[in-house]
Image: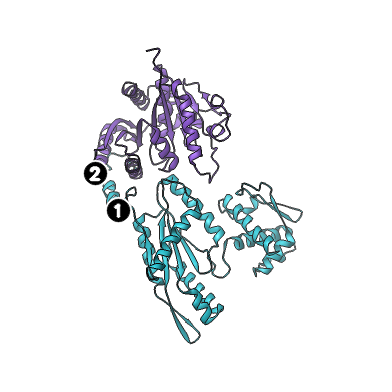
Chain colours: A purple, B cyan
Amino acid sequence: MATEKKRARHIAVISGKGGVGKSVITANLAAALSLFGRKILVVDADLGLANLDIILGIEPPHTIFDAIHRGLPVDEILFPTTKGFDLVPAGSSLPEGTLFTQGLASNVKALLASLEDRYDAIFFDVGAGIGDVVLFFASLAHEILLVVTPEPTSVMDAYATIKVLHHLHGRNEFLLVVNQANPDRSSQVGASIAGHLRNVISKYLESGDPIKIELVSSIPIDPMVPRAVKARRLLMETSPESPSAYLLNHLAGFLDTRIF
Amino acid sequence: MQDAGSNMQQTIAYALISAKISPELAIFCRISEGELTVPNTMSANNSENQKLNLNTALRILENAGRPDPRLASDDPDIQIQGVIDALCDLSIHDGLTGLVNATFFHAVLTREIERSLRTGRTCGLIVIDIDYFKSINDTYGHSTGDKVIQAVAAELKRSLRSMDTAARIGGEEFAVILPECAPEDAIHAATRIHSVLNPMTISVEENSLKLTTSAGLVWTNPNASSSSAELLSEADQEMYRAKRSGRGRLCYRYDDSTLISHQERSALMALPMEGSVDGH
């Protein structure tokens, strides 16, 4: 076991629509897995509009662009958080109008390859939309965690994300997290959204291989979440007893047994 | 002088874009000692701020025939605000038609391409070219040619949604940007505009002139970056295809493999929402 070379599992947290709680979920999962003893790296992959640093209440001196664009050594941009995991920050460093070129993409790949044997898992907190940066990180991921809320726009964007990833990258498996559901019946809401997505997918999307939508968590809307964000701390620190903190911890446990 | 003027127009246009097209351009421009300093934020190879002498600015505006009572004000603050407003207006509009000009068109299109990448929603781009324009010019003269261009521009203005942008991007070439427009909706819009313009009858003195236009329609790809010039060139290719296939036509290529159709949209919308939180 000790001699076996570690190769990190890559997990992309993706949503299509913005503001569905992706970064909060990523940060709490990473912190929980770190508590389980896993070595976790989080890459803020929302290049240009990153906000993990805000959620974590940190101000990292360097960003991923200092590495992939200016050639700074990777160890200088790695930011060890107080929550037990390391962060590759993005800042708001991608200047408006910058194209995500092949050159930049291969630099990101090289950067990740150099880090792979240090960690058990690398999370990509991917931005909104289904642009080229989002597709790039999704294409590197072993697992795709798709975050959706009960809002019709979020369901629509999640479907669009599945469609694009299926058509362009042949992805057939998605781990669905329903977030911000009605607290009284969050598990029913989760099941209903997952079922609905499966129906539309089987009607319009599946041509060959089946597309698997696995509902892995239904998290209720929780007033403690914005409070934690405001305090720039993690939910599991400010309200570890809250239902959503419990469910995030549970989801971390699921991932732990699923991917390692 | 002409060059300095058009350079300045470009600079102001860039400054406008970086100011998110805020009318409060003054925040971005430092004004002192009768000079206007415009930060050239969009230009990578020119980090120097550009300075424009007030007298030069006034001459540019006089040549462009943009009278504004504030330009003659005794109060330098009012005068300089008048200069800024008039230059902004001049820098983004085409004098003949009042549509936005090519520089500003590229700025808007660049922004919409970026929006499309973020939101995953497509933006449509129509390119329209007046058929046999050269022979209209040769037969009836340039002033008739100008009237034809103005008439097409007026029709375009009438048939757009408030969020759409129509531009004159070349002599007899126009472009329309349709932000956040699903492919089916863009086809619908382009077809409507095209049918209004084809054929179009314009009376010039005793003659009545019947003309047609060729049009090409393309979409942004929400999954890949491209520049405004690349997208425009794709639209041009569709427009040339329309020319080659007999003129007076609208051409586009519709590939729906990664786009969301109306049927899919309504199926998704049919999700029973009783499970969501009230008001959400």
The residue beneath circle 1 is B262
| Disc 1 and disc 2 in contact, CB within 8 angstroms | no
Within 10 Å of the Cα at label 2, are there few (<14), some (14-19), or many (20+) other Cα atoms? few
Residue reaching furthest front? B244
Q: Position of residue B95 (x, y in %)?
A: 58, 68
The answer to whether B84 is drawn above or below residue A19 in the figure is below
Q: What subunit carries mark 1?
A: B
Which of B63 and A242 lies nearest the eye of the viewer? B63
Please name the residue shown 48% across and 25% down the image. Answer: A114
Q: Position of residue B169 (x, y in %)?
A: 52, 63
Q: Is residue A47 visible?
A: no
The residue beneath circle 2 is A207
Q: Quadrant of the C terminus of chain A?
A: top left
Q: Amino acid at mark 1?
A: His
Q: Position of residue B174 (x, y in %)?
A: 48, 65
Which of the two marks, 1 or 2, is nearer to us in this view? 2
In this picture, residue A13 sits left or right of residue B143: left
Q: Position of residue B107 (x, y in %)?
A: 54, 54
Q: Quadrant of the N terminus of chain A?
A: top left
Q: What subunit carries mark 2?
A: A
Within 10 Å of the Cα at label 1, are there few (<14), some (14-19), or many (20+) other Cα atoms? few
Please name the residue shown 54% across and 24% down the image. Answer: A75
